[in-house]
Amino acid sequence: MKKVLFIDRDGTLIHETHDELVDSFEKLEFLPKVFRNMHKIKQNLDYELVIVTNQDGLGTPVFPEEKFWPVHHWMLRAFSNEGVDFDEIFIDRHYPEDNSTTRKPGTGMLTKYMNGGYDLANSYVIGDRVTDMMLARNLGTKGILINDGSLKGEINENDLDAFCVSITNDWDEIYKVVSRS
């Protein structure tokens, strides 16, 4: 069965901005070592690569699509130029208060992966928020939290220790973890 890396976008592949809107090229900055390690994952390991991202209010006046898509497509081309093409991309536009089942940590966008055809026990969610580790729990995968350790208490409080197998800010370490499965 196929393994999957469910990868958050903002804060995981690219830096999260203070306003949480990567809506201009000036705000686009990649995490250190992400290209090298994503390339190694694609070349050396057998995972499907899936971006799963919440983009609050995408398509509204606060976050117009014409500001989002050029930056998003440029980011994808940058990865593709390094030999990294994503198998699927899931973008949820809801706000947290909408309580949508498709918004992380909900699994509504990811039901095709939960039908028994994927090795979720040996798959990972990689993200920078506690909700990403909740998604790992909800999918039955492992989780890697991109963080300096400051969210460890929230991981414990939410009983996510069994799912969050690594907390690191280093993409070299992320590669080591996913290469062991």
Image (cartoon, rainbow, N blue to C red):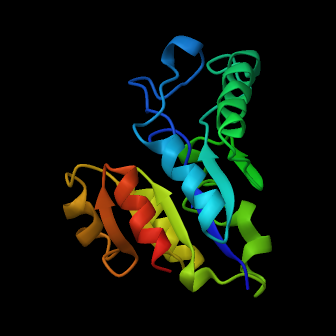
Q: Position of residue 5 (x, y in %)?
A: 60, 64
Image location of residue 163, percent across then percent down:
40, 77
- Residue at image position (65%, 66%) is 107
Residue 94: quadrant of the picture: top right
Q: Relative to 118, does residue 26 appear above or below in the rendering?
A: above
Q: Residue at x 44, y 40 (%)?
A: 11
Q: Please tell me whether residue 110 is drawn above or below residue 87 in the rendered image.
A: below
* Quadrant including the N terminus: bottom right
Res. 78 in view: yes
Looking at the image, which is closer to me, 134 or 174?
174
103 over 144 or under it: above or below: above
**Towards the viewer: 77 or 149:** 77
| Total marks in image | 0
Residue in the image at 51% along x and 70% along y: 136
Using the rendered image of the protein, determine whether residue 102 is visible from the camera's viewpoint: no
- Using residue 138 as the reference point, say whether residue 88 is left or right of it: right
Going by the image, does 136 lie left or right of 93? left
Taking the spot 66% from the left edge, 84% from the top edge, the residue there is 119
Q: Quadrant of residue 172?
A: bottom left
